[in-house]
Amino acid sequence: MHPTGRRAAFLSICFGVLATTSAHADDTPSPCDALKRIVAAAPNFSSLSATDGRAVALPYGDDAKCAASQANYRCTWTPHGGSNADALQGVAADIASCLPDATHDQNSPARQHFHVGARGARTEITAAQAGSNQMKLEINASR
């Protein structure tokens, strides 16, 4: 039996509300898009905002504080759920997969370092533990 009249209108409204308020997986900011945008801004990061880098930290912490200056872009956050080491490895994996041209030249339990570009025109990317319960991402141009 098909709904008619008011019942059909009510069901139509309910399903419409559900369809417009449900979250979609692609609504989540992409760490890759954020990393690419920040690296592309080098050597002058002052065009970036504090929100540009939050998506990098979002899978690992909800309280990212980011800042741009002419010389670098930096974010710090508190990892949630897991350890700093797990968050550091996750950020390093994101950097490696999102920036395939990046060279991973340091891999330690407390620090991951990458660079993009030739000597004299490099963008340095460092993810590191910052104290006992903080993570730090810093991107700068070493030109």
Image (cartoon, grey):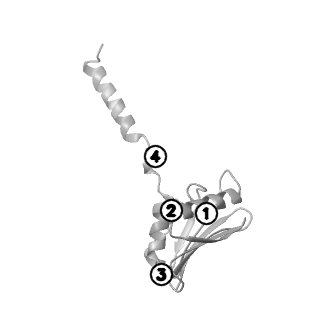
Residue at 46% x, 46% y is 25
Q: Tag on residue 43?
A: 3
Q: Amino acid at mark 2?
A: Cys
Q: Badge 3: few (under 14), some or many (20 or more) residues near its Cα, within 10 Å?
A: some
User: Residue 70: where, in percent of width, then height?
Assistant: 49, 82
Q: Position of residue 45 (x, y in %)?
A: 47, 77
* Residue denoted by label 4: 25
Instruction: Find out whether the residues at labels 1 and 3 contact each other: C-beta distance under 8 Å.
Output: no
Q: CA–CA distance between discs 3 and 4?
A: 33 Å
Question: Vertical placement of 11 versus 133: above or below?
Answer: above
Disc 2 to disc 4, how far (Cα)? 18 Å
Q: Amino acid at mark 4?
A: Ala
Quarter of the image where the N terminus is located: top left
- Of the image marks 1 and 2, the number of the one nearer the N terminus: 1
Taking depth in this image into account, of 125 and 117 the one nearest to the observer is 117
> Residue 108 lies in what quarter of the image?
bottom right
Name the residue located 60 percent from the left edge and 56 percent from the top edge: 61
